């Protein structure tokens, strides 16, 4: 038996998984290094056990080396025959998984200005993995890929045209998650899978996607993964005039605004308490309640916008940490949407049942699995190249 290895690089964490290498890869172990920087920590779920280790100071490249040393005992005499990477930005050129040749890596470097907070980390992880496994096929899976092919109105901003040609476009993110959900819908509910789906990926990062015929039509994130819905610490849609005010009247630098909109806004900024929905749901503070209300209102508004862009809606799907677990958020989003044909069974909703809708629009709660999408991509590519 051999393994596929997946790496999912975030700005402050690297998630990883080992899959038994077969046509439908089978999860063997999973884990993450979080708090990358001065006090990183490894959490790994191996068969029958959870391993937690404090690692001290670690950056993205050394995280890969550290992960490999921790998983080595579980490999025994088996080999890693393919490695898959989640890559935030694939621009318009990469619309499917790609083998990471040096030319592809060079092209990805060109995209750093489009995702300066994420792309360099993905590239650092890729380089470290290539160094550790020379000769093993490395596959890039792009968060933007699922959204390639949007029509002009869902792809452009109304600024002078040449910026569009230069790449200032609505790329859209979280594509691996939406791709997984569409696959699950095809498997479990083929009668609705090709219809008009609105998928709400509500995790620490949050975004929505309108899908028809299994293809992305519209995304709530756009040029960067900060647009659209409010998130744990990201602001979501923001009047550009606010940015001008912060720069011109408050004297904030580009770095300060970056930190403000990516790290200090969203649920955290509104509540002044936490970015974590569980904490806010348990809080008695007014700001926490207002933060949840703002959040659910924006999700609801986006359902309406997506339904209009799809000219109707056949199914609404909730996914990721909040979408899969928060009955309160799902209920607040759905209750006022009865006019669209969206109604839910409160008991099923409280139980996080897979299908909770009772109206003409079917409503689902489906766990997402981005790693599985990456492992499948490696499975598709590696047998042909080994
Ligand atoms: P990431 O984007 O980091 O993968 P997740 O998909 O794990 O994030 O989502 C994290 C979010 O899910 C947090 O806001 C967390 O509070 C929320 N969450 C997890 N479990 C619950 C729950 N039982 N009730 C409400 N929110 C939850």
Image: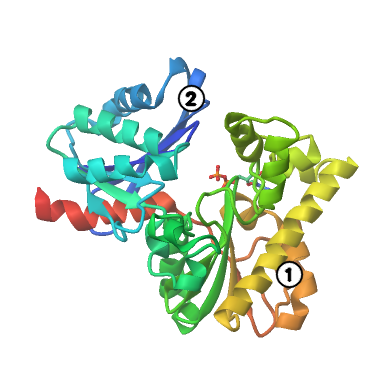
Q: Which residue shows up at 81% across the image and 42% down it? A: 282
Q: Which residue shows up at 39% across the image and 49% down it? A: 89
Q: Which residue shows up at 78% across the image and 51% down it? A: 292
As helix, strand or loop, the secondary structure at mark 2 comes to loop
Neighbours of disc 1 within 10 Å: few (<14), some (14-19), many (20+): many
- Give left or right: position of 49 versus 294: left
Which one is in front, 181 or 85? 85
Q: Which residue is mark 1?
A: 334
Evaluate whether residue 355 shows in this view.
no
- In this rendering, is residue 97 above or below 100? below
As helix, strand or loop, the secondary structure at mark 1 comes to helix
- In this rendering, is residue 185 above or below 124? below
The x and y percentages for residue 2 are: 19, 43
Which one is in front, 126 or 152? 152
Marks 2 and 1 close (CB-CB < 8 Å):
no
Which circle's residue, 2 or 1, is located before the other in the chain?
2
Q: Which residue is mark 2?
A: 36
Q: Which residue shows up at 30% across the image and 27% down it? A: 68
Evaluate whether residue 314 shows in this view.
yes
**Number of labelled discs?**
2
- Give left or right: position of 365 versus 53: right
Residue at mark 2: C-beta within 8 A of ligand 1: no
The x and y percentages for residue 380 are: 22, 58
Neighbours of disc 2 within 10 Å: few (<14), some (14-19), many (20+): many
The x and y percentages for residue 315 are: 58, 76
How many angstroms separate mark 2 from mark 1 (CA)? 37 Å
Q: Quadrant of the N terminus?
A: top left
| Residue 44's disc number | none
- In this rendering, is residue 103 above or below 34? below
The x and y percentages for residue 171 are: 45, 58
């Amino acid at each position: 038996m051999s393994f596929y290895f997946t790496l999912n690089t975030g700005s402050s964490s690297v998630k990883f998984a080992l899959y038994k290498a077969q046509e439908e890869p089978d999860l063997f172990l999973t884990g993450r290094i979080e708090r990358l920087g001065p006090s990183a920590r490894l959490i790994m779920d191996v068969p029958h056990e959870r391993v937690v280790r404090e690692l001290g100071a670690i950056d993205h490249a050394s995280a890969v080396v550290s992960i490999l040393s921790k998983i080595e005992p579980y490999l025994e005499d088996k080999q890693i025959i393919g490695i898959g990477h989640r890559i935030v930005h694939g621009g318009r050129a990469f619309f499917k998984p790609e083998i990471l040749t040096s030319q592809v890596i060079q092209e990805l470097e060109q995209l750093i200005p489009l995702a300066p907070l994420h792309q360099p980390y993905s590239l650092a992880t890729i380089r470290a993995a290539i160094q550790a496994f020379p000769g093993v096929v490395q596959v890039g899976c792009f968060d933007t890929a699922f959204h390639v092919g949007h029509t002009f109105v869902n792809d452009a901003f109304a600024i002078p045209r040449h910026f569009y040609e230069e790449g200032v476009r609505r790329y859209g993110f979280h594509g691996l998650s939406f791709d997984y959900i569409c696959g699950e819908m095809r498997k479990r509910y083929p009668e609705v899978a090709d219809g008009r789906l609105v998928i709400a990926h509500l995790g620490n990062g949050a975004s929505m996607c309108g899908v028809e015929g299994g293809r992305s039509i519209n995304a709530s994130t756009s040029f960067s993964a900060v647009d659209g819905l409010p998130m744990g610490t990201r602001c979501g849609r923001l009047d550009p005039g606010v940015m001008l005010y912060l720069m011109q009247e408050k004297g904030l630098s580009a770095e300060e605004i970056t930190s403000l909109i990516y790290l200090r806004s969203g649920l955290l900024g509104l509540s002044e308490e936490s970015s974590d929905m569980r904490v806010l749901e348990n809080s008695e503070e007014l700001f926490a309640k207002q933060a949840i209300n703002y959040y659910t209102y924006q999700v609801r508004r986006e359902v309406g916008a997506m339904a209009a862009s799809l000219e109707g809606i056949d199914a609404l799907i909730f996914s990721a940490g909040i979408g899969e677990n928060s009955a309160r958020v799902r209920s607040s989003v759905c209750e006022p949407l009865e006019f669209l044909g969206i109604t839910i069974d409160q008991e099923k909703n409280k139980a996080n049942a897979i299908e909770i809708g009772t109206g003409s629009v079917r409503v689902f709660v489906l766990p997402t699995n981005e790693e599985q999408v990456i492992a499948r991509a490696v499975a598709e590519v590696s047998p042909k190249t080994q």
